[in-house]
Image: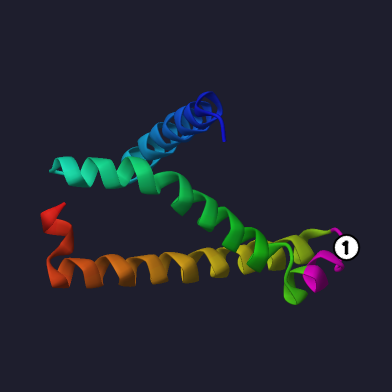
Amino acid sequence: MAPGRFLTILGAWVALSIIVAAGFLLSFWPHHPHSTLGWLLLIFIALPLAALGEFLGDRFIFHSDLGASLSALGSGFVPSLVRVLYVLIVFLALAAIAGLIVTTLNATGWTSAL
């Protein structure tokens, strides 16, 4: 890979990561990293973490067997309500998993180091 192309990819990665990290910071306000390591981890992990969230949401909401059967229900109030409840349940399940991960990191002292 040419050095110019590598720098372009790295620059795009950092720029997109800063944008996504800013969104993470806004959603977790007033909590923020307290060390240089924490800020670096936030910036470099924000983009893959957001991409993983998008992938899991897409996989479990739109491309699952249950999601396909809910999509086939058609239009109307009740099918829409069922689809919204399904998305809400999936979101809450993923949020609970993320909460368990953060709680575990808090219990082991990892987050206080960041």
User: In which image quadrant can residue 103 be found?
Assistant: bottom left
At x 43% / y 32%, what residue is drawn? 19
> Horizontally, is 82 left or right of 48 in the view?
right
* Residue indicated by mark 1: 74
Position of residue 49 measured from the top left corner of the image (x, y, whole percent): 45, 53
Position of residue 55 measured from the top left corner of the image (x, y, whole percent): 60, 58
SS for callout 1: loop
Quarter of the image for the N terminus: give it.
Answer: top right
User: In which image quadrant can residue 112 be found?
Assistant: bottom left
70 inside magenta stretch: yes
Q: Which segment did they paint magenta? A: 68-75
Location of residue 64 with respect to 17 vertically, above or below: below
> Horizontally, is 9 left or right of 70 in the view?
left
Location of residue 8 with respect to 110 vertically, above or below: above
Q: Amino acid at mark 1?
A: Gly
The one nearer the camera, 109 or 28, is 109
At x 74% / y 66%, what residue is drawn? 63
> Horizontally, is 21 left or right of 109 in the view?
right
At x 81% / y 73%, what residue is drawn? 69
